[in-house]
Image (tube, rainbow, N blue to C red):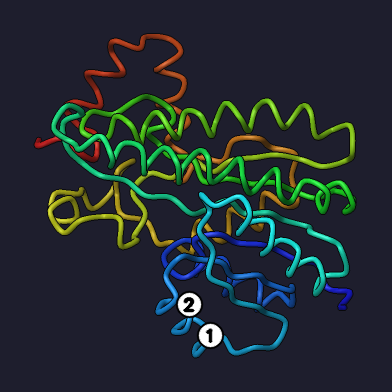
Amino acid sequence: MNNLKSIFITGAAGGMGRSTAKLFLNKNWFVGCYDNNKENLLELEDELGNENIIYEVLDVTNKENFQECVNNFSSKSGGKLDILFNNAGITQGGFFDEIPYETHMEIININIIGVINGIYSASNLLKNTSNSLCITTSSSSGIMGMEMIASYSASKHAVKGLTESLSSEFQRFNSRAADILPGVIDTPMISQEIRENLPKDGIWRLISSDEIAKTVWNAYNSDKIHWYVPKELEDLEKEVAKNPLNAREILKTSGPLSND
């Protein structure tokens, strides 16, 4: 058992999760790294070592597997959890009707059911830790649904709504809920085709995954619910509330998946 603050990260073996694990380990936190990719976890272990950090293979869609990982984490963190970072997620581009049904279900199961499994499994640890934070990766497509990623957009809207509900509910045991709504983050999820068409600056510029790690850190020290990366995405949120049809046209012509 240790007395360090602790963070449990899903999707920790790559991209945003990997950057977050590095940052919090450097800040002397106890870090739990969880991913379904064993090979990438082993690479992460080679890089970060074994002091104040653990690694476990986790299928977030498997509730029993999730609970087992939470229990193992709890035995090493002293029954505490300062941050639960629900970061694991997948996407698949294409027209809704041309994507296999099984792929739609996989997106929903990982991006929504996986998040619910995590929060439910870790809720007792969050309750047992004063000022704990449950933070989840949503998306800019959780601001307004984007074409070619319909089920992914739906899953990220669900995350956003769940976060808003829990931010109120969790007040009763001195815990908080927040989400991150990233734009285009430099992770393996961004295809080469998309990368080649991204602008060099502006709202849809490519942003380092390190910025997400910094956002998780800032969120722990704040009561803010929604975190936009980059911050200009909040302007899109305002446009959606004011004129959703206009916002849709803006996305069609200048969004990250547009051809312009």
Q: In which quadrant of the rendered view does residue 64 lie?
A: bottom right
Q: Which is nearer the eye, 91 or 82?
A: 91
Number of marks in the rendered image: 2
- Rounded to the nearest angstrom, the CA distance separating label 2 from label 1 is 6 Å
Dot 2: few (<14), some (14–19), or many (≥20) neighbours within 10 Å?
many
Tag 1: Cα neighbours inside 10 Å, few (<14), some, or many (≥20)?
A: some
Q: Secondary structure at mark 2?
A: helix
Query: Disc number at residue 45?
Result: 1
Q: Which residue is mark 2?
A: 41
Query: What amino acid is labelled 2 in the image?
Result: Leu
- Residue 144 percent coordinates (x, y): 38, 24
Residue 31 falls left or right of residue 150: right
Q: Quadrant of the C terminus?
A: top left
Place of residue 146 in the rendered image (x, y in percent of width and height, measured from the top left): 28, 29
Which residue is rendered at x = 68% and y = 54% of the image?
Answer: 84
Q: Kindly identify the amino acid type of the residue bearing the numbered disc 1.
A: Glu
Task: State the SS at label 1.
Answer: helix
Q: Are marks 2 and 1 in contact (CB under 8 Å)?
A: yes
Give me the residue at 53% from left, 34% from top: 159
